[in-house]
Amino acid sequence: MDALPDFPTESGPLLVPGPAGQLELMVDLPEEGQERAGVAIICHPNPPEGGTLHNKVVTMTARAISELGLAAVRFNFRGVGKSEGEWDEGRGEILDLLAVADWVRKSRPDDALWLAGFSFGSWVALQGARQLPVKQMISLAPPVGFRDFSGVQPPACPWLVIMPDADEVVDPQKVYEWIDGLDESPTLVKMPDTSHFFHRRLMDLRGAVKNGVRKNLPPPRHG
């Protein structure tokens, strides 16, 4: 097994070992002096449809989180970019997330772990949260109707769901009905007049993420 790299001190790309080979990461660090004791891992949309860590919704979410003082870790699922392996219908992609989370927890053991995901990535994040001590969950346009959400349990932490109210890919009504059927409801933000990819509303998304999680921020980082 390859040795795990240290958590970087500068923003940029990184490779960490995963279950199907190396996984490509991009780390976005907060400004010096603004750091908080937390790391957020962000999962990208469906690889067969072109989803990567460079997706605009993913990068904007990372920007919002790093502006709040947390380190943001985006990564490519297996078979995407420089990540090794092949598409695995979601099963292996959950294992990829768990491998990235394992690296984060070993390299920053005292930091709060946050998870975020866009579309397919939100389903992966919710599945992975069952095995992780997540302190904040962020789900963007969860693909209810495309993935089986019947067994998805609410995470045991604060949970923010942001849904484009004019989503042309995921039926917003199915998402709202799914949320209504949960034992514990997330904080739901309906974003009017915007599509699945938050076209022309990315800055509004940035604000919605920051406003939705601000009260749950981890403490300032020392040292």
Image: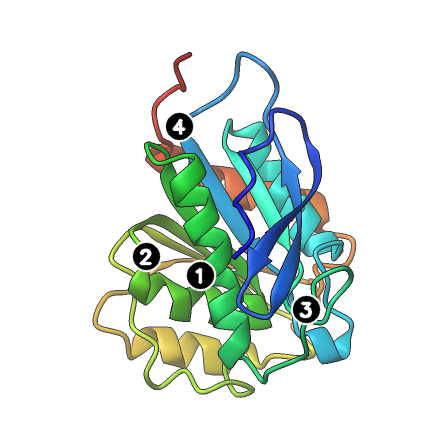
Looking at the image, residue 73 sits to the left or right of residue 178; the answer is: right
Q: Which residue is mark 3?
A: 196
Q: Which residue is mark 2?
A: 132
Q: Residue at x 42, y 52 (%)?
A: 102
Depth check, mark 3 against mark 1: the one in front is 1
**Which of the two discs, 3 and 1, labels the residue nearer the N terminus?**
1
Residue 190: horizontal and vertical position, in percent?
52, 60
**Which of the two discs, 4 and 3, labels the residue nearer the N terminus?**
4
Q: Residue at x 28, y 52 (%)?
A: 157
**Which of the two discs, 1 and 4, labels the residue nearer the N terminus?**
4
Determine the secondary structure under disc 1.
helix
Depth check, mark 2 against mark 3: the one in front is 2
CB under 8 Å between discs 2 and 1 = yes
Determine the secondary structure under disc 3.
loop
Estimate the spatial distance between the alpha carbons at disc 2 and disc 4, rounded to whole Å: 17 Å
CB under 8 Å between discs 1 and 4 = no
Q: Which residue is mark 1?
A: 98
Estimate the spatial distance between the alpha carbons at disc 2 and disc 1, rounded to whole Å: 8 Å
Q: Identify which amino acid the numbered label 4 is placed on.
A: Ala
Residue 213: horizontal and vertical position, in percent?
42, 41
**Which of the two discs, 2 and 4, labels the residue nearer the N terminus?**
4
Depth check, mark 1 against mark 4: the one in front is 1
CB under 8 Å between discs 2 and 4 = no
CB under 8 Å between discs 3 and 1 = no
In this rendered view, identify the residue nearer to me: 223 or 124: 223
